Image (cartoon, rainbow, N blue to C red):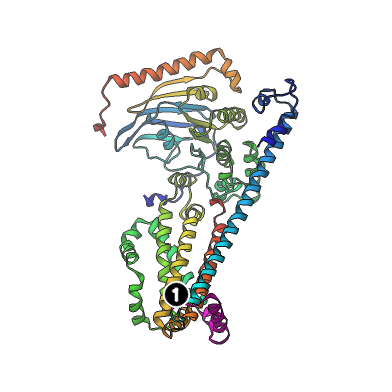
Amino acid sequence: MPDRALPGAPAAAPPAAPDVAGGRIDCANVYKWFPGGIVLEDVSLTVEAGQFVCIVGPSGCGKTTLLRMMAGLAEVDHGQVSIGGTPVNGPDRRVAVVFQHFGLFPWKTVQHNVALPLRLAKTPRAEADSRVADAIRTVGLTGHERKYPAQLSGGMKQRAGLARALATAPDVLLMDEPFAAVDAQVREVLQEDLLALRDRLRQTIVFITHSIDEAITLGDRIIVMGTRPGHIVRDVLVPIEQPRTIAQVRRHPAYTDLREEIWQQLRQSAAEQAGEPVEQAGDA
Amino acid sequence: MSEITGRSTGSPSPAGTSPPPAAADQATPASPKLEESRAQIEAAIEQRLRQRSRRNRRIYLLIRIVSLIIVLAAWQYYGSKSTPVIFDPLTRVLGALVDLFRHQGLGAALWYSVWTFAIGYLVGVAAGVALGMCLGAYRRAEAAVGLYVYALYATPMVAIVPLLSIWLGFGVLTQELIIGLFVLFPCVVSVSYGVRNIDGDLLEVARSLRMGRASLWRHVLLPGTAPYIATGAAQGVAMGLVGMFIAEIFTQLSGLGNLLETAAQTYHTDQALAVLLVIMALGVTLRGLITLVQRKVAPWAK
């Protein structure tokens, strides 16, 4: 356990040439085993640069594991995950993660939390300051820079988490159920703000959620995953144009059908699951 | 409360003469007037709470003073009825205190004790924090020396005092070392626990931010352990004071402990009690200091 406190030296990823495919994510035949059995089985998925993909699925379908692999936080047991054409092995500077638990350091103010990745990257002070101010303004936290996380509401904490992720201007933004820990009203406000932001940021976003509504509201594309072992059961484009607002999504003729379709899909795969014996863990 | 709701019903309510309180008021559509009165109510409630906590604090202070008077009066009463060798009244003890200060070097003894304590304490805390950090963060360090640390922790420190004075003599160094050892263990235990209990989620964040070892210590492990360091340091004060007296009584060198021992052995109970008072005051002061430092070091832990 304590050894976990000592991550290896920063991965010395060669600075990728700024290319068009900078934010492209490729997962090729990815497998993951945990001591209890297989978690992900043969997952292949390509996310184009600039795409906003939502991954929906019941708990235990390995969606978070898949995201952690993209983030370089979990090992790929078989297959390969690449970002911008380079295989992921360890956390990468072009990728930023927004955590469900916010991941803010309680002993740092909003300002210092957001500035931390820049500080670690030894960004010159003046540039770092302006980027931090930008990021904080972008997420609407101006005026709260000097507060500690304990003084913020859940929604504001996640805004700070997002600001930290944006401060480094990453190519890829990985969001792991970022709005799951805030209450329903705040969640909608955050969704609305993310939609508004989306138009200005243009990074590749992978957004994990277990809410079908949230997936349809935010995503350009939805990946539906099933459990035991985790696999992709459906890959669907959301036929609602961006930029959009929550109200537009709810009123859109495609919304109800899509929602129903994904719901059926999830139910069906759950039923199949209940009907047939659990996959053998022995093939590990 | 009734007075506050009374004010709030002053908002325009078409119901007229006698509007039912609160509920009806909220049912009316929010008008600027209503907003205003709500702000008033909130301010009033806040002020009331502030007043109440101020009053409570005054009450606690009063209780404390009354209790102190009772205890001191009881001391005086029973002391004056007792034989001087067994127990002395407060007034005589205070007289002895003044006398000790004027003629028997209580000031110098106090100064000596405080200095010895300060050095031993700081060394003990520094070593304890460093050792605790290592034990907490590095499994291998724990495997290597954990056993001895826990064995010593389980041993009453008093037991090794005689050995230390055999090895090192009866000098100041021995005293400081004894104090240091007394302080060391609470620090080690608290700090290693603190490091081990750092939020795993934050370690993952650190990993995703590609922190190196130095950054990890600086931004995560050290600040994350600060409250535990403070706890260890606070427990160390109590333990260190115990160590100080044991060392002083045992080595009979000088300091408060020696003064106390001498007074007791010559049946100067009033003097012994006077020294005891000084010791108590010292302990309370040091505890207060540590609490202050604690608040400064970890302001987010409020």
Query: Which residue is rendered at x = 70% and y = 36% of the image?
Result: B3
Residue A173 position in % (x across, y down): 52, 35
Quick one: SS at disc 1?
helix
Please tell me how many numbered marks the rendered image carries: 1
**In this picture, which residue range is highlighted in magenta?**
B86-112
Q: Is B220 situated left or right of B182 in this image?
A: right
Q: Which residue is mark 1?
A: B244
Residue B60, image quadrant: bottom right
Q: Chain of mark 1?
A: B
Res. B292 visible in picture: no
Query: Percent x, y for residue B6?
Result: 71, 32
Q: Is residue B65 above or below residue A226?
A: below
State the residue in front, A227 or B97: B97
Place of residue A85 in the rendered image (x, y in percent of width and height, measured from the top left): 46, 35
Instruction: Pick out the residue farthest to the left.
Output: A282
Q: Main secondary structure of the magenta part?
A: helix
Q: At label 1, which amino acid type do we have?
A: Met
